[in-house]
């Protein structure tokens, strides 16, 4: 992405997270500039991801998986493209609600969790803590994955998600974000997602490292062209070899290291 150079006053926070106040933008291009929020996160399955959230546009970029997704007014179509394989998926916003791409599997019980007020690096936030039921499909999924492995006895006990209301999010953008993160909360940004196990193991499924306002060319939110359209979003994010790599990564995350 080609960005203008913003003048930003940043506050360094504990845990290396950064939240920056609205900056004064330096004019470096004749192109139309849009002020957007840049959110840098790390997802346990897809690696580093970056969100660019504007007043009427949103973009997600995963360099590790060679894909990006974009949605913008007035159509609000959601388009995903794998830049390496030159294939893409096109969804209407309505279809995206039911045929999307979740970066993180979330327990069905999350919507019934306990909600408590908290803070995230000094910003108002809420934490949802849910006990994962024995019959939850999430638990069954991991038990099936490791049914013949040393991690077979691992059971998910609770999930914790922290949401922070850092800036306004348009309703259409909220729908797009929910397609990537089914646990998304209205008018808030998911900043942390932690999974806890009965054996005291803890895994960070999502972490946020920086939130800052920058200026980008409006063209960065143009819909891509020239790709081969496919129907399955997995063809955008994971081909057969990457799917195997993802399983190995999950094993690294969830299977305890065996002592020799």
Image (cartoon, rainbow, N blue to C red):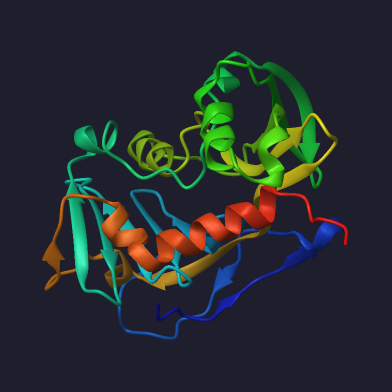
Q: Residue 12, image x and y in percent?
A: 81, 64
Quarter of the figure with residue 85: bottom left
Q: Residue 260, image x and y in percent?
A: 88, 62
Q: Measuring 67% from the left and 57% from the top, which residue is drawn there?
A: 252
Along the line of sight, the residue nearer the viewer: 222 or 114: 114
Say above or below: 45 vs 111.
below
Say above or below: 177 vs 68.
above
Say above or below: 252 vs 254.
below
Is residue 217 visible in the rendered image? The answer is yes
Q: Measuring 76% from the left and 24% from the top, which residue is drawn there?
A: 117
Quarter of the figure with residue 244: bottom left
Q: Measuring 15% from the left and 70% from the top, which residue is drawn there?
A: 227
Q: Residue 138, image x and y in percent?
A: 54, 29
Asked whether, in this view, residue 214 is left or right of residue 132, the answer is left
Along the line of sight, the residue nearer the viewer: 157 or 74: 157
Q: Residue 86, image x and y in percent?
A: 21, 73
Along the line of sight, the residue nearer the viewer: 133 or 153: 153
Total marks drawn? 0
Q: Measuring 47% from the left and 40% from the top, which residue is drawn there?
A: 181
Is residue 35 visible in the rendered image? The answer is no
Tell me the quarter of the image containing the N terminus. bottom left
């Amino acid at each position: 992405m080609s960005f203008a150079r913003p003048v930003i006053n940043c506050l360094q926070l504990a845990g290396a997270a950064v939240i920056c106040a609205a900056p004064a933008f330096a004019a470096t291009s004749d192109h139309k500039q849009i002020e957007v929020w840049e959110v840098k996160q790390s997802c346990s399955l897809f690696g580093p991801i970056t969100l660019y959230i504007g007043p009427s546009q949103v973009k997600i970029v995963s360099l590790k998986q060679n894909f990006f997704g974009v949605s913008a007014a007035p159509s609000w179509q959601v388009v995903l493209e794998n830049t390496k394989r030159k294939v893409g998926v096109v969804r209407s916003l309505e279809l995206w609600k039911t045929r999307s791409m979740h970066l993180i599997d979330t327990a069905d019980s999350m919507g019934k969790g306990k909600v408590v007020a908290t803070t995230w690096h000094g910003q108002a936030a809420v934490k949802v803590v849910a006990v994962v039921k024995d019959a939850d499909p999430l638990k069954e999924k991991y038990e099936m994955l490791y049914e013949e492995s040393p991690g077979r006895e691992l059971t998910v006990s609770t999930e914790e998600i922290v949401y922070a209301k850092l800036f306004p999010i348009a309703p259409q953008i909220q729908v797009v974000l929910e397609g990537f993160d089914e646990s998304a909360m209205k008018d808030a940004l998911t900043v942390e997602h932690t999974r806890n196990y009965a054996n005291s193991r803890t895994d960070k499924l999502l972490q946020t490292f920086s939130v800052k306002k920058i200026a980008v060319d409006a063209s960065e939110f143009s819909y891509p062209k020239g790709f081969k359209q496919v129907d399955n979003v997995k063809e955008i994010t994971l081909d057969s070899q990457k799917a195997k790599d993802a399983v190995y990564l999950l094993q690294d995350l969830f299977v305890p290291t065996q002592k020799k």
